[in-house]
Image: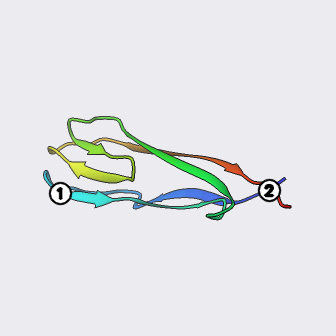
Amino acid sequence: VVVFSPFLVRPRQLYLLPGSVFRVQWSGGPPLGQGSIDVTYRIVNETVSTVDRIGAVSGKEIGQTRLTAVMKSSVLPDR
Protein backbone atom coordinates (compact mmCIF):
# COMPACT_ATOMS: atom_id res chain seq x y z
CA VAL A 1 0.00 0.00 0.00
CA VAL A 2 1.30 3.42 -0.97
CA VAL A 3 0.01 6.51 0.86
CA PHE A 4 0.45 10.09 -0.38
CA SER A 5 -0.37 13.47 1.08
CA PRO A 6 -3.98 14.59 0.40
CA PHE A 7 -4.85 16.33 -2.86
CA LEU A 8 -5.60 20.01 -2.13
CA VAL A 9 -6.60 22.90 -4.38
CA ARG A 10 -5.74 26.47 -3.35
CA PRO A 11 -7.22 28.94 -2.73
CA ARG A 12 -10.30 27.45 -1.07
CA GLN A 13 -12.30 30.59 -1.91
CA LEU A 14 -11.70 32.95 -4.79
CA TYR A 15 -13.28 36.29 -5.66
CA LEU A 16 -12.89 37.32 -9.31
CA LEU A 17 -14.16 40.38 -11.11
CA PRO A 18 -15.57 39.90 -14.61
CA GLY A 19 -12.65 39.86 -17.07
CA SER A 20 -10.04 38.78 -14.51
CA VAL A 21 -8.14 35.46 -14.52
CA PHE A 22 -6.52 33.46 -11.72
CA ARG A 23 -4.75 30.10 -11.94
CA VAL A 24 -5.55 27.78 -9.04
CA GLN A 25 -2.75 25.63 -7.65
CA TRP A 26 -2.86 22.04 -6.42
CA SER A 27 -0.63 20.02 -4.12
CA GLY A 28 -0.48 16.49 -2.77
CA GLY A 29 -0.81 13.14 -4.43
CA PRO A 30 2.13 11.15 -5.74
CA PRO A 31 5.45 12.92 -6.31
CA LEU A 32 5.96 14.27 -9.82
CA GLY A 33 7.98 11.85 -11.89
CA GLN A 34 6.53 8.71 -10.26
CA GLY A 35 3.96 7.95 -12.95
CA SER A 36 1.34 9.95 -14.80
CA ILE A 37 -0.80 12.61 -13.10
CA ASP A 38 -3.88 14.12 -14.70
CA VAL A 39 -5.86 16.88 -12.98
CA THR A 40 -9.19 17.85 -14.52
CA TYR A 41 -11.16 20.95 -13.55
CA ARG A 42 -14.87 21.67 -13.84
CA ILE A 43 -17.02 24.74 -13.08
CA VAL A 44 -20.67 24.24 -12.11
CA ASN A 45 -22.05 27.56 -13.43
CA GLU A 46 -20.19 28.59 -16.59
CA THR A 47 -22.16 31.83 -16.92
CA VAL A 48 -20.27 33.12 -13.84
CA SER A 49 -16.80 31.78 -14.65
CA THR A 50 -14.94 29.24 -16.77
CA VAL A 51 -11.85 27.11 -16.16
CA ASP A 52 -9.38 25.72 -18.68
CA ARG A 53 -7.37 22.49 -18.60
CA ILE A 54 -4.51 24.01 -16.56
CA GLY A 55 -6.74 25.53 -13.85
CA ALA A 56 -6.95 29.13 -15.09
CA VAL A 57 -10.30 30.46 -13.86
CA SER A 58 -11.80 33.39 -15.81
CA GLY A 59 -14.48 35.61 -14.28
CA LYS A 60 -17.39 36.29 -16.65
CA GLU A 61 -20.11 37.90 -14.53
CA ILE A 62 -21.03 38.49 -10.88
CA GLY A 63 -22.41 35.44 -9.09
CA GLN A 64 -21.38 32.24 -7.34
CA THR A 65 -20.20 28.92 -8.67
CA ARG A 66 -18.15 25.92 -7.55
CA LEU A 67 -14.88 24.62 -8.96
CA THR A 68 -14.22 20.87 -8.78
CA ALA A 69 -10.78 19.36 -9.37
CA VAL A 70 -10.12 15.64 -9.71
CA MET A 71 -6.69 14.02 -9.76
CA LYS A 72 -6.14 10.72 -11.55
CA SER A 73 -2.76 9.10 -11.28
CA SER A 74 -1.02 5.87 -12.08
CA VAL A 75 2.03 5.30 -9.94
CA LEU A 76 4.87 3.31 -11.45
CA PRO A 77 6.07 0.41 -9.28
CA ASP A 78 9.51 0.56 -7.68
CA ARG A 79 12.14 -1.39 -9.59
**Which of the two discs, 1 and 2, labels the residue nearer the N terminus?**
2
Q: Is residue 79 above or below residue 19?
A: below
> Residue 23 is drawn in which quadrant?
bottom left
Nearer to the camera, 76 or 25? 76
Relative depth, front residue between 14 and 4:
4
Q: Quadrant of residue 6?
A: bottom right
Q: Quadrant where the C terminus lies?
A: bottom right
- Give SS at disc 2: loop
- Residue 17 image offset from top left, x and y in percent: 15, 55
State the mark number for residue 45.
Answer: none
State left or right for residue 52 relative to residue 75.
left
Across the whole image, how many numbered discs are drawn on residues?
2
Are there few (<14), some (14-19), or many (20+) residues within 10 Å of tag 1? few
Check disc 1 and give the amino acid type: Ser
Report which residue position mark 2 lands on. Answer: 2
| In this picture, residue 46 sits left or right of residue 33 | left
**Residue of label 1:** 20
Q: Residue at x 31, y 57 (%)?
A: 14
The residue lying furthest to the front in this view is 79
Kindly identify the residue that appears in the image at 29 percent across and 51 percent down.
57
How far is mark 1 from mark 2, CA to CA?
Answer: 40 Å
- Residue drawn 84% across the image and 53% down it: 1
Q: Position of residue 33 (x, y in %)?
A: 64, 63
Q: Residue at x 39, y 47 (%)?
A: 53
Q: Nearer the viewer, residue 15 or 38?
A: 38
Q: Amino acid at mark 2?
A: Val
